[in-house]
Image (cartoon, rainbow, N blue to C red):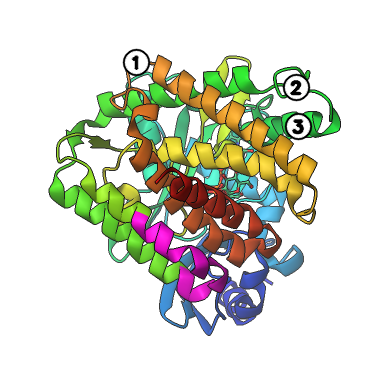
Amino acid sequence: MTDPHGLVDKVVAELPGWLPAQRWFGGKDRPVTSVRPLRTTVLRGGEPLLVHLVVEVEQPGRSEPYQLLITEQVENYDATLDHELTGVLLDLIAENREVDGLRFAHEPGVELQTGLRGRPITSEQSNTSLVFGSQYILKLFRKLTVGENPDLVLQRALHEVGCEHIARPLGSITGELDGRPTTVGMLQQFLPDAVDGWAMATTSVRDLMTERDLHANEVGGDFAGEARRLGQAVATVHADLERALGTQHADGDDIERSVRAMVTRLDEVVSRVPELEPFVPALREAFEQARDTTPGAIAIQHIHGDLHLGQVLRTVHGWLLIDFEGEPGAPIAERTALRSPLRDVAGMLRSFDYAAHQLLVGRPEDHQLAVRALEWARRNRAAFTQGYAEAVSSSVGDPRGRGYLLRAFELDKAVYEVAYEHANRPEWLTVPLSSIARITGEGAAQS
Ligand SMILES: Nc1ncnc2c1ncn2[C@@H]1O[C@H](COP(=O)(O)OP(=O)(O)O)[C@@H](O)[C@H]1O
Ligand SMILES: O=P(O)(O)O[C@H]1O[C@H](CO)[C@@H](O[C@H]2O[C@H](CO)[C@@H](O)[C@H](O)[C@H]2O)[C@H](O)[C@H]1O
């Protein structure tokens, strides 16, 4: 087929059934009622066609734009699976080309190799990333948000101040949405030997679980040294973001806004996930407590916004942070707002809890494993916060001095995770729910 319109019509008709099966689709909680094409750009004519397509996906109570690359050659028309065709994207970036309003550009001073094939990475994710050779990784944002994507904005700013804990930004693809330039893709340096923190941490947990007679500090795969270095890296990135983009003191309005956002999220999530119901009073109390923060006492700035062990890569030179897009499910205004860096600390603390407790999914009765999981989580959470506190340059200082605020942020993240797991991995719902039970239970025991 060489008729792009015929291809688009055919694909659009199939999308209501196809989209909900995609890992990156953010609307799995409700049916797709209709899909309508917003913009079609032919990136390669003839056989095979390569078409860039932005569609508006309608669902009850929401309407959101998504990006697709389509062709008639591969299964389901998804051109991101065609290694040859996706090479076109890198070549367009290398050549600083504009195609029908879609701008492909490399970063200033960057020279890119062309003619490479782009293979999609297979890990579960919110967007689609293509790896070219062993040099580059191109992320195609799936759900689009009008304007420049914070992932690109923050990593560019970090690169400019010489941050050592990110992969170098190399290029971008910009389209137009609602009349505004909108980031649809980001090219970065690929680290072929990097291992993500989630893989490392869960290996360490498994080692501990296997050695039933030993403690976390006695087994070969102890992660605490890495957790501490990771804390140092996160604090350094916070300090670099502060240097690049500034910081300010949270005033009464900022504090009020933050508390309201946590309570609103709780109300919204509990309306969809009744399993959360028993914890609502304790969660509310924890969020309301954050209102006692003295105006001016905490700093707010740009932060990562969705920090967890899957967002950090261990390279031979140390830890790197990736994916500064914020929580994929949160509104863009919230994702780009200045917030306390403690939120990132809380996100990572949640992730240590996740790594430890995911092995208990499907085995809730195993008391021995539950004890070991808690031991691992406590050790690594403590090592991470210690590392964070040691890197004195961050405006937060020692997160351990911010107990009630950190607790509120951790619980807020866990509420987000309840919604995330409910929509994406229902069998994992027990992971955040059991954490909420534990954290609120510990709070009740102290009071
Ligand atoms: N610069 C990089 N070098 C090596 N691997 C990377 C790099 N950036 C991302 N990855 C891999 O790609 C995965 C998805 O990247 P991420 O930015 O988190 O995408 P998403 O927004 O889809 O979650 C990561 O979990 C990591 O395994
Ligand atoms: O796709 P993203 O990486 O941007 O983030 C989303 O998916 C994450 C899962 O892949 C989810 O993270 C949750 O599960 C992780 C383990 O798989 C765990 O390390 C995190 O602590 C936990 O929040 C993340 O919340 C979601 O935004």
Residue 299: % across, % down: 23, 34
Q: Residue at x 50, y 70 (%)?
A: 277
Residue on which the image places disc 3: 203
Residue 231: % across, % down: 48, 24
Quadrant of image for the N terminus: bottom right
Q: Main secondary structure of the magenta part?
A: helix
70 in relation to 181, above or below = below
Residue 51 visible in rendering: no
Residue on which the image places disc 2: 221
41 in relation to 431, above or below = below
182 in relation to 374, above or below = below
Left or right relative to 422: residue 243 = left
Residue 9: % across, % down: 58, 80
Residue on which the image places disc 1: 392
Q: Secondary structure at mark 2?
A: loop
The residues colored magenta run: 270-285
Left or right relative to 221: residue 235 = left
Q: Amino acid at mark 3?
A: Thr
Q: Residue at x 78, y 56 (%)?
A: 362
Q: Amino acid at mark 1?
A: Val
Q: Amino acid at mark 2?
A: Gly
Residue 111: % across, % down: 49, 26
Foreground residue, 310 or 443? Answer: 443
> Closer to the N terminus: mark 3 or mark 2?
3
> Closer to the N terminus: mark 2 or mark 1?
2
Foreground residue, 376 or 345? Answer: 376
